[in-house]
Amino acid sequence: MASLIDSLARSTDSKILLLVCDGIGGFPGPSGKTELETAQTPNLDRLAREGSLGLLTPVRPGITPGSGPGHLGLFGYDPIANLVGRGVLDILGTGVDLRPGDVAARLNFCTVDGDGKITDRRAGRIPTSEGEKRVALLNANLKIAGVEAQVYPVKEYRGTLVLRGADLYGNVTDTDPQALGGLPLLAQARDARSARVAEFVNQFQCQAAGILKGHEPANMVLVRGIDRYDALPTFQERYKLNPVCVATYPMYRGVSKLVGMRVLDGFDTWEGQIDALERVWNDHDFFFLHYKYTDSNGEDGNFDGKAKAFEHVDSMIGRIAALRPAVFAVSGDHSTPSVLKAHSWHPVPLLLWGEHVFPDDCTTFDERAARRGGAGHMLSQDLMALLLAHALKLDKYGA
């Protein structure tokens, strides 16, 4: 399917806008309604009345996706064939010069006791300035033979590790046990060619324990999301598009860079994102707009907070629609029901609005309405074909 769409794609002046409300899908709470059903979203409901709704399955039925696979599916890449580790995505999003063949990983500074057992996986959520001090200590003292190792700060207790050298492969397990009271794990290679990287990670973690000793509360590191960076075909190559990303969090900026998007800077609020979108509207033909707080409230189990986040999204929908894209899609990378406080396997609602979108009978944008919407139920990786078609960016197939 991907090669077919790629062969039919053509460049035009029409514009596509994809708004991803992270973790959009919910589950009924005590009231019997989901967060999206509870929220007051008159602008999204107006688009629902004028457009068409449907459902997306991010990976496959019953599979709970991470944010990386969820977004790659939305961008038209098979999330099973193109699984990319979170370390690669995070570090791409921070602006670090990551090169094909590098191995990248996420770091958590953590707290360990005198026996080396983990007492806080996030080191008391130290401020970014303290994280930067630990990064400087590590870079000044690390000496791992056979590979170039560099640590970069991200935010608060988070950092990233890049390993650069010949023939590196990142099919390696995390050292984070995801629990308190135990020792950090040893990295294990899942295949023979990744054995060297597993050894490098274990050397790094052993050296970090000595370098950070006495620097409580961030006196140890945990290594997560280890993977090798291999370039993917870009939006320009596949779809003949000139894409741009308007997102605040590194992971989503990273997955955008992975597929060739320009990534905008200079904002940290939803309103600032819309200002940025309007400024570059004449410069691009594909716009990826990301909103985070629907997901973070869901993970916190904050039902009312997630409903309010949808209302915050809705407050800017009028300005977005006023730009008159050929097709405007609203959906999500996965579901994050507040009742589960986690990602889930539930399909996510989809809203399509534009000049060539055939209206259905839905009058509100929510999960229940989406189940009877005219756009139907599809895999997320098929969405890009639908967006390109509605923007008249696909040639006819066959004679």
Image (cartoon, helix red, strand yellow):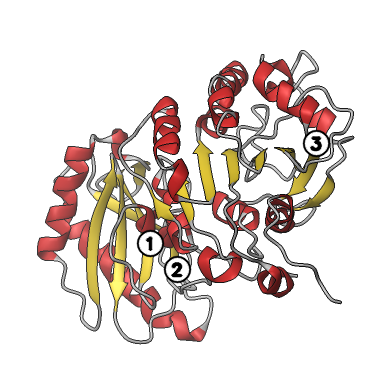
The residue that appears at 24% across and 70% down in the rendered structure is: 149
The residue that appears at 31% across and 57% down in the rendered structure is: 160
Quadrant housing residue 141: bottom left
Which of the two discs, 2 and 3, labels the residue nearer the N terminus?
Answer: 3
| Distance Cα–Cα, label 2 vs label 3 | 38 Å
Is residue 173 found left or right of 310 in the rendered image?
A: left
Please tell me which residue lies in front, 391 or 122.
Answer: 391
Is residue 317 found left or right of 112 in the rendered image?
A: right
Amino acid identity at mark 3 = Ser
Quadrant housing residue 265: top left
Find the residue positioned furthest to the left: 140
The residue that appears at 43% across and 79% down in the rendered structure is: 169
Q: Nearer the viewer, mark 2 or mark 3?
A: 3
Amino acid identity at mark 1 = Ala
Quadrant housing residue 19: top right
| Distance Cα–Cα, label 1 vs label 2 | 7 Å
Is residue 350 found left or right of 321 in the rendered image?
A: right
Can residue 252 be seen here? The reply is: no
Q: Quadrant of the N terminus?
A: bottom right
| Distance Cα–Cα, label 3 vs label 1 | 40 Å
Amino acid identity at mark 2 = Asp
Which numbered marker is on residue 105?
1
Secondary structure of residue under mark 3: strand
Circle 3: is it few (<14), some (14-19), or many (20+) Cα within 10 Å? many
Secondary structure of residue under mark 2: strand
Q: Nearer the viewer, mark 3 or mark 1?
A: 3
Which numbered marker is on residue 227?
2
Which of the two discs, 3 and 1, labels the residue nearer the N terminus?
Answer: 3
Residue 7, given in percent of the width and then of the height, sits at 68, 74
Q: Quadrant of the C terminus?
A: bottom right
Secondary structure of residue under mark 1: strand
Residue 119, given in percent of the width and then of the height, sits at 35, 40
